[in-house]
Amino acid sequence: MKLIRLIASPVLMYILAGLYALILAVATFVENSYGPAIAREYFYYAPWFILLQLLQAVNLSAMFLQGSYFKRISKGSLIFHGAFLFIWLGAAVTHYVGVTGIMHIREGETANSMMKDEGAGMEKTSLPFSVTLNDFRLERYPGSHSPMSYESDLVIKSENESPLQATIRMNKVIDVDGYRLFQSSFDPDEQGTVLSVSYDRPGMQLTYTGYFLLFVGFVWTLFSKKSRFGRLRKELGEMKNNAPFCLLFFLILSGISSIQVLSAQQKSVSSQQSPIAAQHPLVVSQLPCVSSLHAEKFGSLVVLNPNGRLEPVNSYTSAILRKLYGADQLNGMDSDQFFLNLLSFPDEWGAFPFIKVDNKELLQRFGRDGKYIAWQDVFDADGNYILANEMNTIYAKPASERKRLDSDLLKLDESVNIVYRIMQHQLLPLFPDGNDSQGKWYSPGDDLSAFQGKDSLFVTKIMDWYIYELGNGVRSNNWKEADKIVEMMNVFQQAKAKVPTIDNRKVKAELLYNQLNLFFWCRLAYLILGGILLFIACGEIIADFKWGRKLSGILIALLTIAFLTHTAGVLLRWYICGHAPWANAYESMICTSWLLVGSGLLFARRFRILLALAGLLGGIMLFVAGLNHLNPEITPLVPVLQSYWLMSHVAIIMIGYVFFALCALTGLFNLVLMNLLSATNRVKLQFRIRELTLLNEMAMILGLFFMTAGTFLGAIWANVSWGRYWGWDPKETWALISIVVYALVLHIRFIPLLKGKTDWCFNLLSVVAILSVIMTWFGVNYYLSGLHSYGKTEGGDFLLWIWGLGVCLVFVLALFARKRLNNYLKIKNNSL
């Protein structure tokens, strides 16, 4: 009996799950340092790790089968938790019974076998069918090397069946005799294809059954009165005499699930006067400068960027200025003015310090204060590039051996090359070749021999003429001739651009998007209005502000306007890019900020404090998105992201992130309230703390449901794209860690040692647990590498210090809160 009680113990569940999450976290860093093969051998596929997962499954089953637990748990919760047993069993069947391999075929050749990885090496295995590759096609985004799509025309022959002709591409699977074929890769010469082959019918059936049960258990739990969620809803409703409180959550589900109005890209303009202007006011004022009105006309032209996307010159030059200077404006000049100034007056502007350098040692080497150097600083008196030998040495080093100074020099070298190419007219692809089937566009400084006749005369002469007229415009302030030349370029583009064609409506929409800069104003509104609303809400809780409700109504109305503005920006970006705008780290920040503020508005009538906190956090997220660490460019989707699974997987996970953010905000506010307890407000504040704790737990249950569902939708996407559900990629692994962490927080009430401290501990952990989400969302991009590296960003060291400082402050706040609670608990006991 003691053994049975131990196996079914929630304490054992905590130990096993906590150990599991810790091991997974360590494994991701081992993989980053020593490679995936080592991580799989010593962690993910090691016998001891599989045994640990088996013990967790046994512990979960034993807890359900034990009488006391079985009677108390609701059917919805039973189904939800039981679904994991099916998923574990399906994973075991896939691991031990499933077959995976690689099939390499050249055009015109036939293969009837695949190569399997048997650990000790690759082994050839025969298949019950043969595959002939008739043709392989790789489509790139026009004028670029970025793959847009790749596909293979196959003829598949099975025994006793007629040949099957089929085309396979990324996200399109072919099923043959229970085997599934996936487009995996291709040969460099584009004459051969690499297919992934998978046989996993039993494991897939079990796994998908588990996913289905997850959904059933989720819905059942939300509507059941006997579930933990139902009991919390009832208690919270009784505290306010408002039984239908659950409608607020269902509004969230219905409102947020229309997530097709989501996520936005912010082009946060740092419009403050630059530090360079303060250091060099006379130099700046004396430099020749192109008119802003003419620059606006130039910015409305179209270029084909290196990613193969047609975009306004304004978007293109903004990306260049951010790369060089670290902001969207330089001393009040927009990016189009800067680009034309550099193009037209290279000598004058080449002496001006606008290339950002973060390394103080490099700045001192060039004799510069502040953060910037000039392009001419890297050349000696004879015009020689003084970094040439140093750069050759760095490029000869393996990437793993390069130091921080080496990385900073590489970034500086890249910036110098960008400026050089602008001055040489090689970084402005304005001219489409109407006869090129691949849709190539040329810069004025490129080899223009592909153009013939009048087109050749136009593209070879127009830029010199244009630069001459820009000089005249600066001297005479007459821009008519320069305006005419821009119009001539526009006419040429409209006539010659065939692949791809120019969508003038999208070009105008993108120019409007850039000009309005909606997310910058939303950021200001969220921070200011959220801060004022927080002050009023706290005053109402502590000091009974009588005038707070009327003023709060005005603030909520203004926040609603800001949210609608945010929504307009999201929709505008969605229209411009042609797909759901949440394909990278920047876009996910905008999306989550939008969701967070929207969720706060749904709670505004009853919990204004949540709207205040959501507004503040939404503003902070937009502020972080506007920093130069995140790239706000609109970019084409890589082939694997061109799937409807992207929308559902990312959207649902982000809803989970929003709920977890609300939990962290609520928990933090509760810790503050605990520190404000006094003899006069104890009853009122304890009531409010309990009320918000109930809300916190309900939000966490919803967050865990959505996070789990989104993660397993990602597994289905991976199965459709690559033929496997789980590859132990660091992003996947940390998503699983987040699920485990929040599951542990939700079950702390089962720990006997925390009796009487549950509310305090739960609120503290709801704040600390958000670190696992931050690591999943951004930390993986900063500190680890993997399949999700398309979202990779910079600046991880700085954020690490912020996270560490934040955690320390939260724990200090929690310790003082615990001390204050203990004092009032002693007073209460003495009075009894």
Image (cartoon, rainbow, N blue to C red):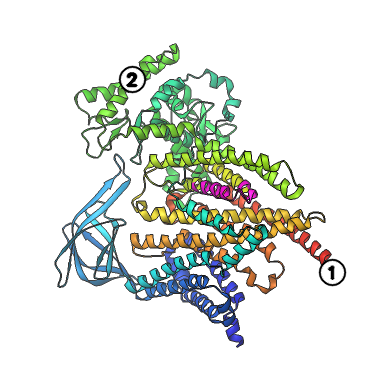
- Residue interval drawn in magenta: 591-612
The residue beneath circle 1 is 832
Residue in the foreground of this view, choosing between 235 and 675: 235
Q: Main secondary structure of the magenta part?
A: helix
Residue 299 lies, with reference to residue 83, above or below; the image says above
Asked if residue 526 shows in the view, the reply is no
Q: Residue at x 41, y 22 (%)?
A: 344
Q: Position of residue 191 (x, y in %)?
A: 21, 53
Is residue 604 one of those drawn in magenta?
A: yes
The residue beneath circle 2 is 485
Disc tally is 2
Would residue 611 be found to the left or right of residue 482 on screen?
right
Q: Residue furthest top?
A: 476
Q: Quadrant of the C terminus?
A: bottom right
Q: Quadrant of the N terminus?
A: bottom right
Q: Residue at x 39, y 30 (%)?
A: 422
Asked if residue 259 shows in the view, the reply is yes
Q: Which residue is drawn at 40% across and 52% down?
A: 647
Q: Where is residue 99 in the image (x, y as percent from the top left)?
A: 32, 71
* Distance from the alpha carbon under mark 1 to that under mark 2: 90 Å
Amino acid carrying mark 2 in the image: Ile
Assess disc 2: are there few (<14), some (14-19) or many (≥20) residues with their C-alpha within 10 Å of its C-alpha.
some
Q: Is mark 1 on a helix, strand or loop?
A: loop
Residue 33 lies, with reference to residue 412, above or below; the image says below
Would residue 797 be found to the left or right of residue 86 on screen?
right
